[in-house]
Image: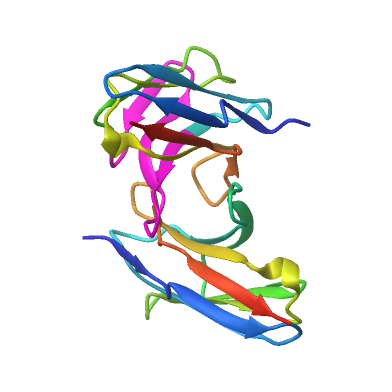
Amino acid sequence: NAGVTQTPKFRILKIGQSMTLQCAQDMNHNYMYWYRQDPGMGLKLIYYSVGAGITDKGEVPNGYNVSRSTTEDFPLRLELAAPSQTSVYFCASSYSEEGTEAFFGQGTRLTVV
Amino acid sequence: GQNIDQPTEMTATEGAIVQINCTYQTSGFNGLFWYQQHAGEAPTFLSYNVLDGLEEKGRFSSFLSRSKGYSYLLLKELQMKDSASYLCAVMDSNYQLIWGAGTKLIIKP
């Protein structure tokens, strides 16, 4: 029972490089989310998806892109990495948006230098 | 704006009881969640409150007062493994989760 799987766990990028953070869930959840977590701050929603083919911006979408071609996968793309994107990124999924718990991946610690 | 407030850090003794408070001001309310996050790990779900009152789940209880915009998480019979950050999150009228910065709980022997 894998739950939510995120890769990679750690990554160092140089300014201007690009990368994709992978996220997959095997619980057949419709709702998937990408958050970033900075020290001393609450989780901030970057993008979310309510089902395959549907994505929408969260609170802090600038500098990121997502796609949702299947129910299982929800990759996050960083284009032209900047030091401000240094953070811990969490992917999460839930069965619905109302009152159900979100299941989180183990996180990706990204450093942009 | 939307705001979730909780203490930054608390210290308690093994075997004791601790109460972690959370106050919120959000655009609408569709429930309040508590998550536990150990250092370097992912948040894991603890509790959900949508109606006023106390929800008890083993050593952990969560209370909600919607009229006061207030919740607390009560941890009893503290164990060393309870050392973690506790995150309060409110689901607003758009069903978006607004997260507090978390309360780091330190348990001392």
Q: In the picture, residue A60 is in which quadrant?
A: top left
Could you say where residue B23 lies in the image, as x and y percent from the top left?
A: 39, 74
- Asked if residue B26 is positioned above or below residue A106 in the image, the reply reads below
Camera-side residue of B101 and A92: B101
Is B33 magenta? The answer is no
Residue at 74% over, 82% down: B109
Image quarter of the N terminus of chain A: top right
Q: In the picture, residue B76 is in which quadrant?
A: bottom right
Q: Is residue B105 visible?
A: yes
Camera-side residue of A97 and B42: B42
Is A39 magenta? The answer is yes
- Report the magenta stretch's main SS: strand
Could you say where residue A63 lies in the image, as x and y percent from the top left?
A: 26, 27
Could you say where residue B6 lies in the image, as x and y percent from the top left?
A: 42, 72
Residue at 73% over, 30% down: A2
Image quarter of the C terminus of chain A: top left
Task: Give the total of numbered labels.
Answer: 0
Q: Is residue B55 visible?
A: no
Is A106 on the left or on the right of B96, as rendered?
A: right
Is B78 on the left or on the right of B6, as rendered?
A: right
Task: Read off the magenta span.
Answer: A33-60
Residue at 62% over, 57% down: B38
Camera-side residue of A94 and A83: A83
- Asked if residue B41 is positioned above or below residue A62 in the image, the reply reads below
Could you say where residue A26 lies in the image, as x and y percent from the top left?
A: 68, 25
Residue furthest to the left: B1
